[in-house]
Image: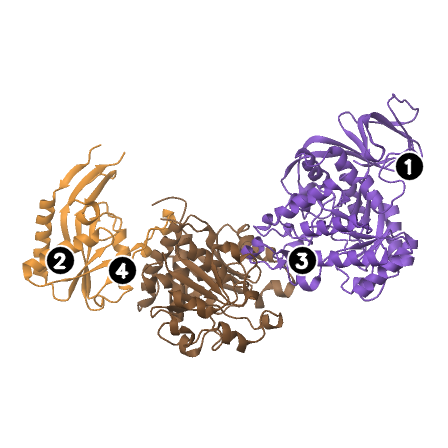
Amino acid sequence: MSALVIENGRVIDPAQKIDAKLTVVIDDEGNIADLTSKRVRLPNADVVDARGAIVCPGFIDLHVHLRDPGHEYKEDIDSGTKAAARGGFTLVCCMPNTEPVNDNAAVTDYIVKRAAAVGSVTVLPIGAISKGQKGEQLADIGEMAAAGAIAISDDGRWVQNSSLMRRAFEYAKGFRLPIITHAEDLSLRGRGVMNEGSVSSELGLEGMSPAAEEIAIARDIQLAELTGGHLHVAHVSTAKAVELIRHAKRKGIRVTTEVTPHHFTLTDEVVRGYDPNTKMNPPLRTEVDRRAMIAGLRDGTIDCIATDHAPHAIVDKEVGFDQAAFGIVGLETALSLGLKLVEERQLTLKELIALLTIKPANVFQLKGKGSLKKGTDADITIFDPKKAVTITAKDFLSKSRNTPFEGWKLKGCVTSTIVKGSIVYP
Amino acid sequence: MEPKLLMTEAQMEESLSRVADEIIADGTEGVALVGILTRGVPIAQWLATIIEKKQKKAVATGSLDINLYRDDLSEVGAQPVVRPTELSFPVTGTGVILVDDVLYTGRTIRAAMDALIDYGRPRFIKLMAMVDRGWREFPIQADYVGKKIKTDANENVKVMLQSIDGVNKIVVKRQA
Amino acid sequence: MKLSLRHLLSVRDLTKRDVELILETSRSFKGISERDIKKVPTLRGRTVVNAFFEDSTRTRLSFEIAEKRLSADTVNFSISGSSMAKKGESFIDTIRNIEAMKPDIFVIRHSQAGAAAQAAKLIHGRVVNAGDGQHEHPTQALLDLFTIREQKGRLKGLKVGIVGDIAHSRVARSDIVLFQKMGMEVSVAGPATFMPFGIEDWNVKVFTDVRAMLPQLDVVMALRIQRERMGEQFFPNEREYARFFGINQAALHEAKESLVIMHPGPVNRGVELSTEVIDGPRSVILDQVTNGVAVRMAILYLLLGDTKEM
């Protein structure tokens, strides 16, 4: 590997409170060697001209579905990490609802090795809480941790059994693993396919009550308090849920949370028209909830932005709204949607970058990630925040095209993604 | 261009009176006057009134909507408004005199005969037209005619009637 | 004259003028069904596909008779014999395949809300929603409206009550919107478990006691109760439902003499309505069925006209 010099860019690194025109120097081992205001000329170094662009730590996504192993027709580690790189993400954490489920070290190990072999970006696996995500018996949590799992979750299925969840908190604590909850009381959700509200009533679609999410979060907060474990609430989506988390944080309970770009951008109004690409879980909520997501991002209640990148093939979506799979792809649209909040003056550019870099790194205590500190891995994203883009699903590097943002005219485009000193995109 | 007056109300009355004489001469027993919607209907009623006055005996009337039987439905675009057909007598066995305002291509009359036959088997179908302007496209002729005139293709014969237009007269307009 | 819309997917899309046109045209078409020769050549050469992805006897029969009386070529497609069920073909692919055969009108019934709307995006012809999940059943609402006007001679100011499972009913969803559009006052009655979320915003009066609602009404529509809702904890049992929300002679004691009783069918005798009420003088349930054919004929006829004014 040759050394790399990124010059003329505006370097923003919220972790170090840097916002200046600097040159980033990367050594031939892929580490950050220096940030300097001087011109640097190194023999044999490649040079990236970042004029007019932002240079920042690589984005971190705590919540993606790479569908590998088992559902490679939707996505695999190769395509999923290419999509991540195109979206400016240098590190993604992948959920365990694969086939087989990542509930044992063999699957964890497969993901780690496969990612090392073909992945464009760093992949950190998340193991299951329960065997087969069935909510009955603890998965091989310790062995998965030893194989590289950085958190555990039954994402997609809430652990309905409170006793099992309590034991999971207690057991995982010993391995310093956060527990990610997909908060949803399944009996209350019933056959719901969209947010329960005036829109679902009008459309004749079964509703998913916000209470199903709030009840689940309330219980899990109680268990976190009881056990002293670390609860990470995946994709928070209701105003009351944000309030529950805000309250728990004030009480000093170890709880963190994330929000997806679609939940801070869209509401259930877009379900009119029955586009299956507006169907996801948690569902798009109301404008009150959407505003609460933004408020949560601003006041720090919500720790970070995560995409819940959930690729689905056309056959999973073209079956009518009720039967369509939940979820949308998110890696390749996240930055532009975040920049929309900046444009609307809901967030500053620095805040947005922190929510995509150091803050998610801190949630999972990813050492040496999320900043441009000297000596750390040179994971760097360079983007042009002003460039106009039109979301075009057929240009996605993901295998799947399930986005509700097709045709949206936004701003912001990743120009280079660098992982450990190597340019992985374009 | 100013429309040309073809017939006044008095002239229409005079023509209808002559037609009434012809119909009475042919026999009105078991005969009904059926106006083709829209403008055929008031003419049929007008004619029936004259016949009743002359022979001191009423003659049955009805109205027929032919829109569902048109041969140009696939071409005309917007669907014509369909109104109820009202035939208060059994069509089977009745001698029906169809009444229309203007006899032109004959297509309306073809549709009217098809429509009528779907209601039963009339003893006969005859045709009365207020104005016969020529330009037939089908082998159809009127049995009774109020006035026969020669027209150009770009002329439009309009029979105006009290109940629809507020005045009884017939005009010929040249289309731009 | 033409409708302001290309497909009939939801009664929300209809203007008042569209509704008037459909009602007027239906009146004319009703006569055809009363003749010996119940057929007009109007849709000769047109192809109508009845795509029924959900079981339905009455609605399909009604559409098929309407189509045949207009001389259309009718093709029926139902889920049981379809390639979709057997081969796992996606709904959208099935629609694309039918579209490739160029039907003029596509009548679609599906158990999923929004199915007709999704199909309409792919169809060059016209789409008629014959019921999509719990969303809408616009032709049913129009025939209900036609029947009410036939009975009452007017619509504006009439008080209509709908009784039963409002939340899961596509008929209720279409009826409420259409009736209100035509100036009628709508109230609903039933157990609170059967009220849709946010009904407060629907501009309807909500009763939990059907007997309290009945005396003010000009028209009452009882909805069919699905037995499977018992298993889902919406109500305890049919006996209790009949006792508190069913309509029998005793419940009608204080109702207006002129009250008209309707039901979209099929009726669970003794549950929503007692047998005396179903077969009694105020019931127009069979008129609804008769009128269904005329209204569907009118809709098919009107949907095929557009492009230019007469």
Whether tag 2 and tag 4 are in contact, CB under 8 A, the answer is no
- For residue B85, the mark is 4
Residue nearer the viewer, A152 or A242:
A242
Q: Pinpoint the chain carrying mark 2.
A: B
- Among the chains pictured, the one given purple colouring is A
Whether tag 1 and tag 2 are in contact, CB under 8 A, the answer is no
Give neighbour class at mark 3: few <14, some 14-19, many 20+ (Cα, 10 Å).
some
Residue drawn at x 81%, y 65% is A163
**Dot 3 amino acid type:** Ala
**Dot 1 amino acid type:** Thr
Percent coordinates x, y for residue A257 in the rendering: 77, 48
Residue that carries the numbered disc 1 in the rendered image? A376
Whether tag 2 and tag 3 are in contact, CB under 8 A, the answer is no
Percent coordinates x, y for residue A73 in the rendering: 74, 53
Q: Can residue C101 be seen in this view?
A: no
Q: Pinpoint the chain carrying mark 3.
A: A
- Among the chains pictured, the one given brown colouring is C
Above or below — where is B153 with respect to A98?
A: above
Q: Can residue C195 be seen in this view?
A: yes
Point out the frontmost of discs 3 and 1: 3
Point out the frontmost of discs 3 and 4: 3
Assign a secondary structure to mark 1. loop
The quadrant of the image that shows the N terminus of chain A is: top right
Residue that carries the numbered disc 3 in the rendered image? A211
The answer to whether tags 3 and 4 share a subunit is no
Residue that carries the numbered disc 2 in the rendered image? B48
Q: Chain B is drawn in which colour?
A: orange
Alpha-carbon span between mark 2 and mark 3: 76 Å
Alpha-carbon span between mark 2 and mark 4: 18 Å
Point out the frontmost of discs 1 and 4: 1
Give neighbour class at mark 2: few <14, some 14-19, many 20+ (Cα, 10 Å).
many
Alpha-carbon span between mark 3 and mark 4: 59 Å
